Amino acid sequence: MSKARIDARFAALKAEGRAGFVAYVMAGDPDAATALAILKGLPGAGADLIELGFPFSDPMAEGPPIQRAAQRALAAGMTLSGVLELARAFRAGDAATPLILMGYMNLILHRGIETFAHDAAQVGVDGVIVVDCPPEEAAPLAKALDAADVALIRLASPTSDDERLKVVVKGTSGFVYYISVAGVTGVKEADAAAVAPAVERVRRASGLPVAVGFGIKTPERAAAIARVADAVVVGSALVDEVAAALEMNEDVSARVLLKAESLAKAVRAARIGQTTV
Amino acid sequence: MTSLARPNDYTAYPDAEGRFGDYGGRYVPETLMPLVHELDAAYRAAKADAGFQAELGGYLKHYVGRPSPLYLAERLTAHYGGAKVYFKREELNHTGAHKINNCMGQILLAMRMGKTRIIAETGAGQHGVATATVCARFGLPCVVYMGEVDVARQEPNVFRMNLLGAEVRPVTSGSATLKDAMNEALRDWVTNVEDTYYLIGSAAGPHPYPEMVRDFQAVIGQEARAQVLEMEGRLPDAVVACVGGGSNAIGLFHPFLNDEGVKLIGVEAAGEGMQGRHAAAINGGRPGVLHGNKTYLLQDGEGQITEAHSISAGLDYPGIGPEHSWLHDVGRAKYLTATDQEALAAFQLCAELEGIIPALESSHAIARLPEIVAEVGKDGVVVLNLSGRGDKDVATVAAALGRKI
Ligand SMILES: Cc1ncc(COP(=O)(O)O)c(C=O)c1O
């Protein structure tokens, strides 16, 4: 089912003539129960795909918002097993929304690559993004995930030239994640004018839909990217809502879902009145 | 794990993918991969270029002060009553440690690559000082990431870096020590991909760093091998070094790797003791992936990286360079440990008997000498890498001994 769920969702988006909204949230942030409430609410708030971060002590590609989210989740006791349990609980109530796990290699190695791939498939995970596992190191993981019918989602970035793109997209499935800025998550702002030709290059090289993330924080920016990409990923701006809600003593899931809704609306409206790309 | 097949030529590693057996590799975000490949190509060209090597050799001689002496520590030898103990005097280098060997090599490479901004991580501040030094010498701007905790406990080195014109950025994320400084330096690199060169301070990180740093530090072992042959007419029975990330140790070991009669002994920091908080990645950790390479790491039951502890800030790191992990697994090198208390005692002993105040890092290696010289025996020869001088540590030692200074 897994890879098929991603393909079906992108096919539906294409038929609707709009970009997808991908919501990134950190598993277990600020605690397991609240994170599950957020997960369950995201499709209703307009998320077309969900990226579920699994917290690591040393997230080298994250900026402060997601670093802090990981620390909150770890402090509340989240583990990789706990993340898989969250995925299972989410999947029990939603058969259609693709769920992508995103995190770092060490936790996967620690669990065992084959065990991880098997467990992820079991609980209804459709794809995996491993930030610190470039194609050069990915062979064992790619093989195990492939056997479990889980997509290993590849990343491309502004530093990927055409030669590099060939390496990046080789044997990939699902979609390609285009990192819109050279940098960590949640700091620099993505520029839609620069992103458009890059998305086109990645599409051509991969033959897959392209989701764009890193540096998209506002509905305006999300809409601009939605005009040129197949999907728009927002992470830091959502986890920042967790932080803000905690600080203001507000209902965390309500606040996060409200933000997700405003972003989803902007993404959905972005191409209205525009000829489809 | 000595069941692994031993290779015929230990110096043939890493392979083209940067692997020492299963260790090493390039576990970095995609954005950095083209940069890591670019660095690899540039390093390979420089390595093969006689002009580059000659330029580096010139600076090592006239600026760093190489070769460093090999010195017979007579009173320590007599004190232990076993094998002859020689010190490889890396503490006599400019800036007081072996770190500058690597910094000089990398800064010349950075300039060759046309990079105009240098970043580095530091724990004790020794690598930061060495990096700031070469940046001052060649007129390049320098940013050093340092954990907030280390900034507080290594105040003089922070000031030294500032005097040399470097900006020291305190790191507050995670545990605010060396591993977090390295995370932050990687984040800077991924953000400033055009102009910035990341000057890593130990034989760790993504390929080609472990190989490159080893090659730049191998001058230690090359000199020591020639010096001991001249002074003793034979190879030593054992060579010994402390291990943080592993650069001074691999620099000493590497030219001896194929001399199978020479025991290679690394000493990790056991901190409060192996049952308590420590920094011994091989003796107390498991293989995993951090900071771009697969290697032995301190981690908890879930695979989260745990904080290291050592009285010596330069050994206070939860990982170790990948070549050491491999040398351990294949059984070519042996990794022992020394506690904070043992290092403190060795620090004082060396000062009193030899008139040399060693770095706390190097004191860990000295602390294991009694067992090593006994094992090698009275006719034996041991070479110990005195990786740095201990002036930077006098405040820490005074505090540990309950003395107000
Ligand atoms: C004097 C000295 N020795 C040893 C080390 C440990 O580093 P490595 O294991 O890379 O030699 C340091 C690190 O700061 C140091 O300053």
Image (cartoon, rainbow, N blue to C red):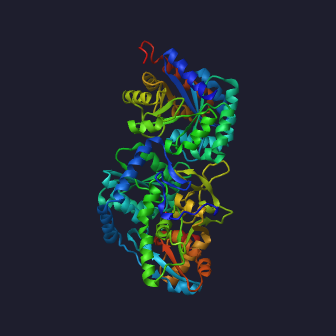
Which residue is more in the foreground, A177 or B398? A177
**Residue B371 vertical position relative to residue A180 in the rendered view, above or below:** below
Identify the image quadrant of residue A276.
Answer: top left
Residue placed furthest toward the top:
A273
Q: Is residue B389 left or right of residue B111?
A: right
**Residue B263 vertical position relative to residue B168 in the rendered view, above or below:** below
Which residue is more in the foreground, A253 or B401? A253
Can residue B360 be seen from the camera position used here? no
**Residue A155 vertical position relative to residue B358 in the rendered view, above or below:** above
**Residue B81 vertical position relative to residue B383 in the rendered view, above or below:** below
Can residue A276 be seen from the camera position used here? yes
Q: Residue at x 66, y 66 (%)?
A: B273
Q: Residue at x 56, y 60 (%)?
A: B326
Which residue is more in the foreground, B391 or B389? B389
Residue placed furthest toward the front:
B8
Rendered location of residue B250, percent (x, y): 49, 65
Identify the image quadrant of residue B201.
Answer: bottom left
Which residue is more in the foreground, B64 or B333? B333
Rendered location of residue B396, percent (x, y): 53, 68
Q: Residue at x 52, y 41 (%)?
A: A131
Rendered location of residue A57, percent (x, y): 58, 47
Rendered location of residue B316, percent (x, y): 55, 61
